[in-house]
């Protein structure tokens, strides 16, 4: 009998022998035992994870006459249906490849749709397994839709795909969807060791892990890699070096040494180590994958998820930021886009050297800057301490000055309040705006000196208090605010203009006559100044016009 390849020879023969898909196995097993079978399924997931194998053992289980009695343990069942399925000669299971044979609607109609109403013979169900179903044309999906809407009772359709997004939603909504996942490394390890033992080969757990880690979570890939080792390695014991040589796998210690030298600024040694790998005719993609795997292991080592002595030294030296930088450079490299893949890998090493050491230099500069900042801060603190001591000595002097200033400020506030109250006495008069021109005052002996900013303002006040009634109002307000009889005087900016007036009307008139000439001259000056800002008509001119 012709020897079968490993992945077909070790294909699961029951649902219980499916590894890595425990939830899916549980769902399918319960549906069989409880007789709640769906008429259509979608098995989606990465290649090599057991989608087609699960479909076959599911079809085998629902057609086996002893499956329910044996709780679906049918690995060694010898019934006619199971024997035919194991020998790939069963007429109740029809496997179709949508990627090649039934892409067009005519092909699908010929090989499937015209035959679905035929009974499965001695079996209970007829099962169609459509592999790579996402490759069907739009018209083929439309033809399949009618069957999924009204399937015969004996028909079960299983659609297998690695790209479920390409299947129309009208198809997906009529199927039970089961999503397969990549198989864990430890589960692949156990299966490889079991196969090796059965094939009379010795495979340690460590070496099985090397194969499993390069299978990409696919059991079929792992079994094919193992078979390659069986064919190439004649020794019964599958050694680590032999496996790495056959599969073109890079020893993790070499990439770790390269990164160690890069961190130590030894770029030339790193390039030499890389070229030694080239001289061994190693697969370039494997070199790149070894750096990817090393970054992952280093990251796990940092978070205590991975423990290995060969990366312990590097793991304690490198930082997480450096691991991220290296990982980004490695993952960005696409070897297929380069004609000279050796050169691309050498440039990758140089990029890692530049980025990692540039970050280290920037960190050193940052630390140096922090040290300088601390020294500067210390000097500032010392200077501030001296200033505090000096200020303590000055504080007593300032306290006395502040007390004096406080008294002055209080007096100033009191003066402002009295002046405000005085001005408010004239709010109901038509000449209140003239009173508001008073800017300040002071009392010298028995004289109250009002200060103005312009001579014309004094003239306006003089015109108003020339009226005896308004003069009395003015002097009464002074007495009410300052609580005593005071003579009053008008000055410019603190300068006395020798115009002393008291509440005696006769004295006021005499003063007015004596200053008449001066007032006329000052009025002319005021008119000349005002005319600079626009036309100004004198009161005398208005009277002449009228």
Image: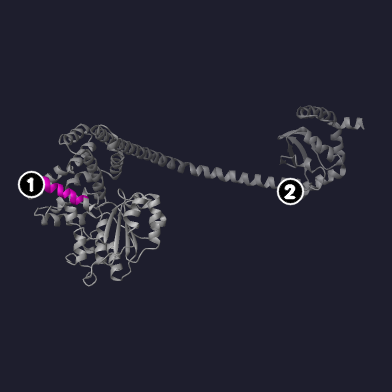
Is residue 91 or residue 384 the one in the foreground?
91
* Residue that label 2 marks: 421
Q: Is residue 48 depicted above or below 382 in this figure?
A: below
Q: Is residue 187 depicted above or below 388 in this figure?
A: below
Which quadrant: the N terminus?
A: bottom left
Which quadrant: the C terminus?
A: top right
Indicate which disc residue 27 carries: none
Q: Where is residue 162 in the image (x, y as percent from the top left)?
A: 31, 51
How many numbered discs, if any?
2
Residue furthest bottom in the image? 69
Q: Which element type, helix, strand or loop, lies under badge 2? A: helix
Is residue 342 or residue 408 the one in the foreground?
342
Is residue 404 or residue 466 the one in the foreground?
466
Q: Give the range drawn in magenta.
A: 221-234
Q: In this view, does 28 lie to the left or right of 509?
A: left
- What secondary structure is the stretch in magenta mostly built from? helix
Q: Where is residue 259 in the image (x, y as percent from the top left)?
A: 22, 39
Q: Where is residue 337 in the image (x, y as percent from the top left)?
A: 30, 35
Q: How far apart are marks 2 and 1 (CA)?
A: 118 Å
Tag 1 or tag 2, which sits nearer the N-term?
A: 1
Can residue 3 be spotted in the picture?
Answer: yes
Is residue 18 or residue 397 the one in the foreground?
18
**Does the magenta run of residues contain 227?**
yes
Q: Position of residue 399 (x, y in %)?
A: 53, 45
- Within 10 angstroms of label 2, few (less than 14), some, or many (20 or more) residues? some
* Residue that label 1 marks: 234
């Amino acid at each position: 009998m012709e020897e079968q390849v490993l992945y077909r020879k070790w294909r699961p023969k029951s649902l219980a022998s499916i590894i890595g898909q425990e939830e899916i196995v549980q769902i399918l097993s319960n549906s069989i035992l409880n007789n709640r079978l769906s008429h259509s399924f979608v098995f989606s997931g990465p290649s090599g994870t057991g989608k087609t194998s699960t479909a076959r053992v599911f079809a085998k289980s629902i057609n086996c006459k002893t499956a329910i009695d044996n709780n679906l343990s049918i690995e060694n069942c010898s019934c006619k249906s199971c024997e035919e399925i194991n020998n790939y000669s069963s007429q109740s299971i029809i496997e179709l490849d949508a990627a090649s044979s039934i892409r067009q609607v005519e092909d699908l109609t010929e090989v499937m749709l015209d035959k679905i109403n035929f009974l499965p013979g001695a079996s209970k169900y007829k099962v169609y397994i459509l592999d790579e179903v996402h490759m069907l044309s739009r018209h083929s999906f439309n033809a399949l839709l009618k069957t999924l809407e009204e399937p015969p009772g004996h028909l079960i359709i299983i659609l297998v795909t690695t790209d479920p997004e390409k299947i129309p939603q009208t198809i997906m909504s009529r199927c039970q969807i089961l999503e397969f996942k990549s198989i864990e490394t430890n589960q692949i390890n156990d299966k490889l060791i079991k196969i090796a033992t059965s094939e009379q080969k010795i495979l340690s757990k460590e070496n099985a892990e090397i194969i499993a880690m390069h299978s990409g979570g696919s059991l079929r890939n792992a079994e094919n890699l193992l078979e390659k080792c069986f064919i190439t390695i004649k020794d019964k014991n599958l050694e680590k070096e032999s496996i790495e040589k056959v599969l073109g796998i890079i020893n993790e210690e070499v990439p770790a040494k390269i990164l160690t030298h890069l961190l130590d600024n030894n770029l030339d040694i790193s390039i030499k180590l890389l070229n030694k790998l080239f001289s061994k005719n190693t697969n370039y993609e494997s070199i790149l994958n070894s750096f990817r795997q090393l970054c992952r292991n280093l990251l796990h080592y940092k978070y205590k998820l991975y423990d290995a002595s060969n990366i312990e030294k590097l793991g304690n030296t490198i930082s997480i930021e450096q691991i991220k930088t290296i990982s980004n450079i490695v993952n960005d490299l696409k070897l297929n886009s380069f004609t000279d893949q050796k050169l691309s890998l050498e440039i990758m090493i140089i990029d890692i050297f530049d980025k990692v050491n540039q970050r280290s230099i920037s960190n050193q500069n940052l630390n140096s800057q922090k040290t300088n900042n601390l020294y500067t801060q210390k000097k500032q603190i010392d200077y501030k301490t001296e200033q505090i001591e000096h200020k303590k000595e000055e504080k007593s002097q300032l306290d006395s000055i502040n007390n004096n200033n406080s008294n002055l400020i209080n007096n100033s506030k009191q003066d402002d309040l009295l002046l405000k109250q005085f001005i408010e006495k004239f709010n109901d008069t038509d000449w209140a705006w003239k009173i508001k021109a008073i800017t300040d005052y002071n009392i010298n002996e028995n004289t109250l000196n009002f200060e103005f900013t312009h001579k014309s303002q004094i003239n306006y006040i003089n015109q108003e208090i020339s009226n005896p009634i308004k003069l009395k109002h003015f002097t009464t307000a002074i007495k009410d605010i300052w609580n005593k009889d005071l003579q009053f005087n008008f000055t410019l900016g603190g300068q006395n203009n020798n115009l002393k007036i008291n509440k005696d009307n006769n004295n006021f008139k005499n003063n007015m006559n004596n200053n008449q000439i001066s007032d006329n001259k000052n009025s002319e000056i005021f008119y000349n100044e005002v005319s600079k800002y626009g036309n100004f008509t004198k009161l005398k001119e208005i009277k002449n016009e009228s």
